[in-house]
Image: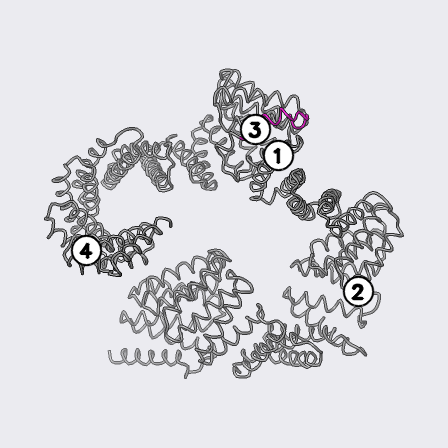
Amino acid sequence: VQEMEHYEEALQLKSEAFGGDENHESIADILFIMGCHHQRFSHYKFAQKCYEQALRIYKVTLGYDDLSVARVLHNIGIMYHAKKDNDVALKCLRKSLSIRTTQLGETDLSVAESHCWIGKIHREKKYYKKARECFMKAHRIKVAVLGKSHLESAEVLHNVGIVCDDLGWHSQSLSCFREALLIRMANVSGAYDMAGISDVCETLDCIANVYRIKGERQKALQFFEQCLKRRVRVVSSATPSDEIQVSLLLRTYEDVIALTKKLCAEKNELSPRVGLLLAEMGTLYDQKLNKQSRALTYLQKALQVFQQKKDYKQIGVTLSLIGVIHVKKSANEKALKCFRDSLVMRKMASTENETAGIAETLHNIGNCEAREGQFQNSIESYCEALRIKKKIYPSEHISIAKTEHCIGLAKLQLGHLDEALESFESAMKIRQALLGDHLDVSFSLHSVGRIYFHQNKVDDAIACLEKALAIKLRFLPEKHMSLAETQHLLGSLYIKKNRFEPAVPLLKSALIGYKGTRECEVMKSDVLDLLGNAYAGLGETEHGILSFEHSLKIKKVVVGKDGVACANVLMEVGKLKSLKNDIDGALFAFKEVKRIQKNLYGKNHLKNAELLIQVGLIQDQLGNNQMALKCFAEALRMRRKLLDEKHRDIAEALVHAGRMHQAMGDHYKSMTFIKEAIGIYVESDGDGASQEYADACRLLGLSQHASGDSENALPSLEKCLELREYAYGAESEHWAEVAYDLGIAKFEAGFYDDAVILLDKFVLIQKSLETNDPESLSNALLNLGKIYLKKRSVDNAMVHFDEALGIRKKMSKNEIGVSEVLFQIGGVRESKKQYLESLVCYEESLKLRLSVHGEDEDTADIISRIGEVRRIRGQYDLALENFTLALDMYKNTVGEAHLSVASTYHSLGYVCDAKNDMEKAMQNHKEGLSVRKIILGGDHVKVAASLDDVAGMYQKTNEQKKALKCLREALRIRKVQLGNDDIEIGKTLFGMGIIFAAINDNKKAMECYNASFEISSHDGSNPKLEAQTLHQIGCVQAASCNYREALQNWRLALSKYREGGMRDDHYMVACTLGNIEMAENVLNSS
């Protein structure tokens, strides 16, 4: 970005220098450089703009045949090649070549460069002879100018070999490759010339492939092995290896393995070499690509080979590698099993049980045991590993230090500080001697500093941690967790020594390091407390208060706002606010401290708990849910402390607290409280069942339902209904209110018949009451209408919607309720194709909603339905306005990554399609597809539906191959999600058949149609699809002049159309009838 800003500034200065004369050569030069910059970063639109301006100026100032014109045309050609537009690219490159040849002659290197690019494009277009001719011309020029042994000559010769291979001229291709290989090998400057070695590998790979094509497997394997050896060196070199080199290496591994297997199969033997290669591939996937699942696949394959060969040593090695990967995947139990099995195998393979491999495996076992919290076991494993290492290694060996350090960590966890310190110091001594200021030394220093911290040896701890920090700062990024840990610990020690000034930047840096992870909330809170103290020590009161308040916010989330930790922080806040003369703020903080400490340490009495329950009920009536919850929670705390844990009064407080959590939408906490209360009621009620228990079951069911757990919600509500019926009867208001809750839950769970019975009974009881609840009654009627819609009983649904509408219109300030019912009625009218009436309902619903809420998701839903009705009615401009407005509203309310946004994009696509604006239609369908992919991933059926829409647009623009690609991906998704026999698979296959027929691939079209028909005829739910498929099969047969079979399929199609209720005047039926008549005429005439 900075570089481009410099170019733009230079361009502006030159334009000003030439007095606004844009047709100046030096301006064109800047524009050309800017174009090159944009092209380098694939910003082709901007690059093309710069190149076109430069080209115009060069042509005006220098003429059409100047070399600068050729240079620009050459770059434009390369750019179009990158954009896959080879025809335009070829045109530009040929024009550039013509100018260069005219101006420079046939033997200039730029002419050779043009020939190379033209040859490359010819090869991509499969014009291999033309490509070879271009590369040969380029080779002659480069040999003449640079010499035969130049790397560029070798590169062109390599390309000649590739084209000869394409032509099947294997002898000539081998000759070219061998000559290129010799040149490239001669030009490798040394063992660290990775670019040169990569080029050699490229040619070795080509030679091996030619021998493989010729069937000379042994020779092919020899060259692949040479290539493999070099590629391993490239990837494992000191310079960072990119994924391209790793991919090339993996491909070479695959080639070597495949040939090795074939050669072994000819000899009827299994080579352990295959296992070693597979293990190396697994290690590569793990260490270079960080793809642990793929790594496991290859290591497991290697393990199978070694198991067949009974190579216990390699089995042990491979199991250790698998164990390491399981550790990375946090599968500690699997890792531990692998390491233990590895240990057994290594011991079986070795004549002596004291090898480096055995020691390392024991160390890994210790690591896993430590992660499981088995610190004593881990120490035993580490000590056994250490004993072996000390026997086979020199006394100062890095592996010994690693194990001693881990022993120290385990002993620290057990609280054995002196023993841990001894281990840490021993490890540190070795690391310092062998590594100097290495990162491992900093870990040892940090661990020693921790021990000194726990032993209150402040100065010694500071000395160690300062050294550790200096090393870590050199090697670790500023947000690294290990760096934050050292800064945190050192900052706390500085504060102990009243060194506040250096403590502040350390603690700020630690805070940044901890911010990256949610697991460090407690650590962040501790750092903020320390920062608050440091600021207070420096006299920066405002900063101190902010730090403590931020800490308090975290503590409230992590440990609860009524804990002693919050009281301690509030005390510090109060002190600092009093220093600022913020008396009210200080008093409030101290009052909170008093409240917390009083509640924690004294004045506990059951009367206070009872009082709090009553206060809580009043606060509940006032709508002060949070205050009510505080009262109930405090009462619960007191009762738990003073009563038996199964006392019914505790259950009462639990129910009230759970009810408050439910009112505030925290259903998980609500269920936790109410389940505990139910447990108490069940135990204390004995064989009977109290109404307190029934009420608790109802509350539990409501929270379970609200949290989406219908499986448990239904039994809870059914239990309550049963108890209410037993206590009050099935005609009572008490029974009815639970019947309403259960009916709604049954509806949402898909039990429509049960829901209708319950809600009908509720409506009947409500209507029988002297004063009914109009809100609940109208809700029940509305939901009954929705159920009848699900059951496809539209008239019944309409009756209930109309009744609900009448009730809601009588209620005051109920615009949203009326709007909701009108929206449902509009949907019914729309389903009955009463579009004008539907539109009236939707618009009235929208007007009411906007009068209260303005823009929100539900408002956007209404606008979207209005757009859909207008689309159906052919009012495309109005529909476009509606969908555009709905889209903006969705984006503003629910964000751009939402399914409603995706659906609206597709609706816009349908409208643009109807308006013959194919470009915008395609753009909208692709946007819809993109949003669904972001939300649902690449394998969801809604993504498949989006792909259908995109495919449809490609069909309309006659881009059949692209359409086919979309449908193939849609087919793959549906097979993954729905299985191979779903009707949606049949529809997709039918669509693919249409495309194959359009591109005259009748064989594949017939395969698709037959597969589609097999699914639809077996399913039996879509006779129209069966008929359409039979019709298309007949068309394919007719195209092959097989009119007899075509006639048979068309007659079957006609039968299916009629079976599906379609009349003969329907355009599809009429088309089939016309084809039948045509086929009969042809057959009769013949």
- Three-letter amino acid code at the position of disc 4: Val
Disc 1 to disc 2, how far (Cα)? 50 Å
- Three-letter amino acid code at the position of disc 3: Glu
Q: Are marks 3 and 4 in contact (CB under 8 Å)?
A: no
Disc 4 to disc 1, how far (Cα)? 65 Å
The kind of secondary structure element at disc 2 is helix
Give the residue displayed 68% in from the left and 65% down from the top.
745
For label 2, the residue is 621
Q: Earlier in the sequence, mark 3 or mark 2?
A: 3
Q: Quadrant of residue 919?
A: bottom left
**Circle number at residue 69:** 4
- Three-letter amino acid code at the position of disc 2: Gln
**Residue 44 x %, y %:** 31, 56
- Is residue 270 at least partly visible in the picture? no
The boundaries of the magenta stretch are: 452-469
For label 3, the residue is 466
Q: Earlier in the sequence, mark 3 or mark 4?
A: 4
Question: Of 692 and 20, which appears nearest the observer?
Answer: 20
Q: Are marks 3 and 2 in contact (CB under 8 Å)?
A: no
Give the residue displayed 71% in from the left and 78% down from the top.
812
| Dominant SS in magenta | helix
Give the residue displayed 45% in from the left and 71% down from the top.
908
Question: Of 256 and 1077, which appears nearest the observer?
Answer: 256
**Circle number at residue 491:** 1
The kind of secondary structure element at disc 3 is helix
Question: Of 345 and 762, which appears nearest the observer?
Answer: 762
- Three-letter amino acid code at the position of disc 1: Gly
Q: Quadrant of residue 777?
A: bottom right
Position of residue 294 in the picture relative to residue 566 (left or right): left
**Residue 578 x %, y %:** 74, 46
Q: Earlier in the sequence, mark 1 or mark 2?
A: 1
